[in-house]
Amino acid sequence: GAGVSQSPSNKVTEKGKDVELRCDPISGHTALYWYRQRLGQGLEFLIYFQGNSAPDKSGLPSDRFSAERTGESVSTLTIQRTQQEDSAVYLCASSLVSLGEQYFGPGTRLTVT
Amino acid sequence: AQSVSQHNHHVILSEAASLELGCNYSYGGTVNLFWYVQYPGQHLQLLLKYFSGDPLVKGIKGFEAEFIKSKFSFNLRKPSVQWSDTAEYFCAVNGGRQAGTALIFGKGTTLSVSS
């Protein structure tokens, strides 16, 4: 079966513009996570979806960041009014159950100019 | 503060040398521990994991890791590295009283293996 997919693979945007990043998790995986990896840093947790429960948004760095997930399928991460410090690789992961093994997508490299 | 620490930022080895990458975490309670690897140009892949049971776990490509609860450590080892092991290695933890469900990652160790 297919792994986690993300689109676009690369995104260059001007400071102040909004961007949307998409994640397609592995079919049947109930848990979906967004992480961010800035240059020279480890991965930072952003947000977590589990089934129909309210998402855990504790990792979102500001109110410019938001995410949605439709049921147990696609998720979209939106960054409004992008800033240069938002430049990073945004990674999506899914797992069959919470606390289970997480499978990562290839990431979206976001560059804010 | 709760954290995952990887002691080595960049490790350079010759082929056939032995490898040990350190990882310590600071979370209380029962945690799940992982090592992920990112080969050049590829996405993160799971190398091995520890949930419970035998504290010595074996993963893919000859890697193993030992969970030492008293030291809050989960060091990665390989007896003889190959050029193809050149990659970035991340230790991660979830579960426990403070870590929650999302993975908390160390900052990564870059391994360069010369042939």
Image: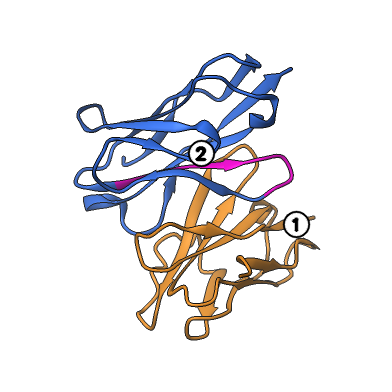
Chain colours: A orange, B blue
In this view, A45 is above or below B68: below
Residue B69 sits in quarter: top left
Circle 1: element type = strand
Say whether marks 1 and 2 touch (CB < 8 Å): no
For label 1, the residue is A112
Name the main secondary structure of what is drawn in magenta.
strand
- Assess disc 2: are there few (<14), some (14-19) or many (≥20) residues with their C-alpha within 10 Å of its C-alpha: many
Magenta run includes residue B41: yes
Is B63 placed left or right of B115 in the picture? left
Query: Dot 1 falls on which chain?
Result: A
The residue depicted at 66 percent of the width and 23 percent of the height is B112
Instruction: Count residues near mark 1 (Cα–Cα under 10 Å), then give few for <14, some for 14-19, many for 20+.
Output: some
Residue A92 in picture, x, y percent from top left: 57, 62
Q: Amino acid at mark 2?
A: Phe
Q: Position of residue B77 (x, y in %)?
A: 46, 25
Given residues A34 and A20, the one toward you in this image is: A34
- Give the residue at x 65% y 24%: B82
Asked if A63 appears above or below A89 in the picture, the reply is below
Classify residue A49 as left or right of residue B85: left
Q: Are marks 1 and 2 on the same chain?
A: no
The residue at which mark 2 appears reads as B90
Is label 2 in a helix, a strand or a loop?
strand
Identify which amino acid the numbered label 1 is placed on. Answer: Val
Residue A4: x and y in percent read 60, 66
Name the residue rendered at 29%, 37% in the picture. Answer: B26
Closer to the camera: disc 1 or disc 2?
2
Q: In the image, which residues are magenta?
A: B32-42
Tell me if B71 is positioned left or right of A34 in this view: left
